[in-house]
Amino acid sequence: MKYISLLGATGSIGRQTLDVIRQHPTEFRLVSMSFGRNVKEGLKAIEEFQPSYVAVQNKEVFDQIRPVVPSNITLNYGPEALIEAAAFEKATILVNAVIGSVGLLPTLQAIKEKKDIAIANKETLVTAGHIVTAAAKENNVNLIPVDSEHSAIFQALQGERHKNIERLIVTASGGSFRDKTRDELKDVTVKQALNHPNWSMGAKITIDSATMMNKGLEVIEAHWLFDLPYDKIDVLLHKESIIHSMVEFHDGSVMAQLGTPDMRVPIQYALTYPDRLPLNTERLNLAKLGQLHFKEADLKRFRCLHFAYESGKIGGTMPTVLNAANEVAVQAFLTDAISFLTIEDLIEEALSKHNVIHNPSLDDIIQVDAETRKYVQSLIS
Ligand code: NDP
Ligand code: MG
């Protein structure tokens, strides 16, 4: 039996994680969870899974639900509660599915308390990858990817030796605007951007997919998870999202992981690793698909991908700035405060103003993250 703590239970990954738990009641038990402000979904999950600990984002939500949550369930709110939920005593594994760098401190605390980590929350690895991976090593805990590309690479690497890797090939659907030219991106709306062709995901990552920042964040995530330099991590456009990523070895052999696009597969694998369990997912039928398409990723067309490679190569606090600027800019776009292409301009501006700190401490990262948010916000308002 695995005892699970789930951060972000009401989100896209969170709800799919609950579905995996629901399908295997003798294997998994939800002991702790968090959600933000979605009271309806949050209460539904509490009622069904009866966790021992629940963290919510703020006091308003806490006051609203305390009267209806059974008194044997500990309920708390705010950033400290998120950390407590992550590192909840009875949990053996944390599924981190919150959005944004708010996931960093809870992850670090759970690692300290020797929980394995199933990491969907890529912003945590982008903003402080060296700290998180070092802590995982030091505490001897597994850091298992949930992101489909990284799960694919992780699966392709089972039984392989790190020294034999030639390069990683991270596939990208291209997002909602993959067939548009830069000129055609000028007037796109939030609604159009939220219409992803292959995946149904939370709003922030769907916009990140449209700007290709998602792939940029994933390149940095891959750098930390698989301990490889950026010139060994390539991005390949593959519009069907069937090959979830690949590893090329020195002998020219390429290992790929395939499947229909369903995030429950990598979520469940992170929970069962190194074992597997059945799952009621749509099976891959290659004969029916007929063909798959591939195209080089153009860094001039996808400026955010270029920014991510550059920030990753510079290292230090540069990826922290990239991530924080992106979080603020995407939020502004989602609320119609800026246009789609302004997302890129704001990120570029924040990166160009930053004096990088090499080998930053956790405090440096927290400070740079806060300063960047404030700076980008000041450019918007
Ligand atoms: P969603 O926006 O759907 O869900 C985010 C979750 O985090 C919700 O439960 C939300 O609560 C909660 N939350 C948001 N802000 C805060 C906060 N400040 N404090 C506490 N909780 C908060 O996101 P996704 O599920 O799409 O993505 C989650 C993570 O997984 C991201 O890092 C994303 O990049 C990654 N990922 C997602 C994929 C997908 O298919 N969705 C695929 C691969 C990676 P509430 O809604 O109740 O306010
Ligand atoms: Mg992904």
Image: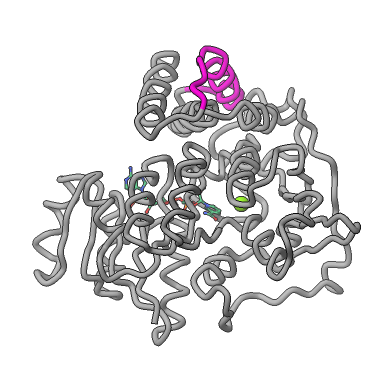
Which quadrant does the N terminus fall into? bottom left
Which color scheme does this rendered protein use?
Answer: one colour
* Front in this rendered view, residue 113 or 107: 113
Residue lying at 58% horizontally and 66% vertically, measured from the top left: 266
Instruction: Count how many numbered circles sit on residues in the image.
Output: 0
Residue farthest along the right direction in this orientation: 252
Judge from the rendering whether residue 89 lies leftward or rightward of residue 172; answer left or right. left
Segment tinted magenta in the rendering: 338-358
Which quadrant does the C terminus fall into? top left
* Front in this rendered view, residue 201 or 133: 133
Q: In the rendered view, would you say 328 is above or below 375? A: below
Percent of width and height locating residue 25: 39, 84
Residue 351 located within the stretch drawn in magenta:
yes
Residue lying at 53% horizontally and 44% vertically, measured from the top left: 205
Judge from the rendering whether residue 228 lies leftward or rightward of residue 370; answer left or right. right
Judge from the rendering whether residue 152 lies leftward or rightward of residue 133; answer left or right. right
Residue 321 located within the stretch drawn in magenta:
no
Residue lying at 25% horizontally and 47% vertically, measured from the top left: 57
Percent of width and height locating residue 316: 53, 28
Percent of width and height locating residue 150: 63, 56
Q: In the rendered view, would you say 43 is above or below 207? A: below
For the stretch drawn in magenta, what is the main secondary structure?
A: helix
Q: In the rendered view, would you say 98 is above or below 229? A: below
Percent of width and height locating residue 244: 71, 59
Residue lying at 45% horizontally and 73% vertically, measured from the top left: 19
* Front in this rendered view, residue 42 or 309: 309
Q: Quadrant of residue 157?
A: bottom right
